[in-house]
Amino acid sequence: MPTNKRPNIPIESFNPMQIYLGTEMIEDWQEGQLTRRKMLKRLIFICGSSAGAAALLTACGQPVNAPSTAAPTDTPKPTDVPKPAANTVQPATPPTPVPTPDKPGVLYVPPTDPDVDAKEVTYENDAKLSGYLAKPKATGTYPGVIVIHENRGLNDHIRDVARRLAKAGFIALAPDLVARGGGTIAVGDDKVPGWLSQAKPEDLFKDMSTAVEFLEKQGVATGKLGVVGFCFGGAQTIQLAVSNPKIKAAVPYYGPTPKTIKPFAETNAAILAHYGGNDQRVNSTIADMENAMKDAKKVYEKKIWDSAGHAFNNDRGAAYNEQAAVGAWKMTLEWLKKYLA
């Protein structure tokens, strides 16, 4: 479609989650993690139309070539993630594709691990929900941890994170926050970021809180609940930690600080936040949470992994950084054990 036939869509018409996830798709393309075709396809679903995708590309200083994929029909809806500055994504020449790892990283716990009992589960509120539950095989009560996925939905990497927690002595539940749309697999890889960008914030919080209630019934020690999340899930981890008083420990990985959120003074959670040193877009929001937690006199620490970028923990992705992932995981387990002991 020629540029002059597209409607003029102002960047202000997008909700903060659309901008956050949209700029992330553009960054992934710049870094060689996505082809331009796949980036454009996902951007259309996030922005609601090819014209919307073109508007966001223009705001990010990128050349516009008309995407050929048909636009989704969903109407964008507001969410609670801060809007990055338009200049956080710089122009780039077409990238050289970065190979993804051909096998999981050193932290991987296979589904057949003899110390872990893991399975898909379903539960309900006003919708049919689903997730992945991982427990230590040995009978007993354990602390519980919610695991909140990236903008790719509930995939094998997040299932592995749940098993890692079970191996370490926690009962972990990874809810599929795309369940209202039919689930991650049904929605499809290219559409999941768009679906999440247009989800109602109140539904996301309701579904996370229902996951907490379900987890409590799985042999979790009373009052011992935490949450870990990544990217999109990092932001949702902060939301859950601040909004649900049952959460006593939270570890967001490279999650932007939400702007529309209850005061940090209301949280009962000790928060440890991990960031990649090269992740400028997310790191621009660190001071907001750090200052708010300090003002509220809450327990807060941050760790910036200098050699790493965004999504450094995901050993199935091109941004995986083993040194940072292993170091962050060690700190995460220590933090959860300390505050959920």
Image (cartoon, grey):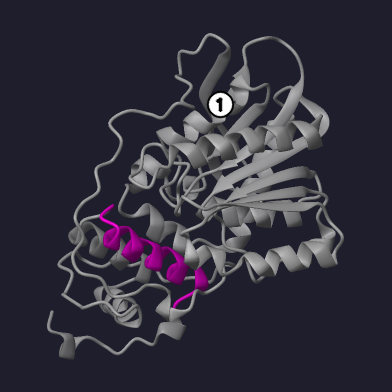
Q: Residue at x 75, y 56 (%)?
A: 242
- Estimate how packed mark 1 is, as few (under 14), some (14 to 19) or many (20 or more) residues with alpha carbons within 10 Å: many
The answer to if 245 sits in the magenta stretch is: no
Q: Residue at x 75, y 68 (%)?
A: 291
The answer to if 26 sits in the magenta stretch is: yes
The location of residue 193, given as percent across then percent down, is 40, 57
> Given the current orientation, which residue lies at the most extreme left position?
2
298 to the left or right of 152: right
The location of residue 78, given as percent across then percent down, is 53, 71
Q: What residue would you read off at disc 1? A: 164
From what the image shows, is residue 295 above or below residue 171? below
From what the image shows, is residue 256 above or below residue 104? below
Examine the rendering and report whether any part of residue 16 can be seen: yes
Location of the C terminus by quadrant is: top right
The location of residue 5, given as percent across then percent down, is 17, 88
Q: How many marks?
A: 1
298 to the left or right of 27: right
Residue type at mark 1 is Arg
Residue range corresponding to the magenta coloring: 14-33
Q: Residue at x 78, y 48 (%)?
A: 270
Location of the N terminus by quadrant is: bottom left
Majority secondary structure in the magenta region: helix
Q: Nearer the viewer, residue 5 or 331?
A: 331
Examine the rendering and report whether any part of residue 133 can be seen: no
The location of residue 7, given as percent across then percent down, is 26, 88
The image quadrant of residue 121 is top right
Q: Secondary structure at mark 1?
A: helix
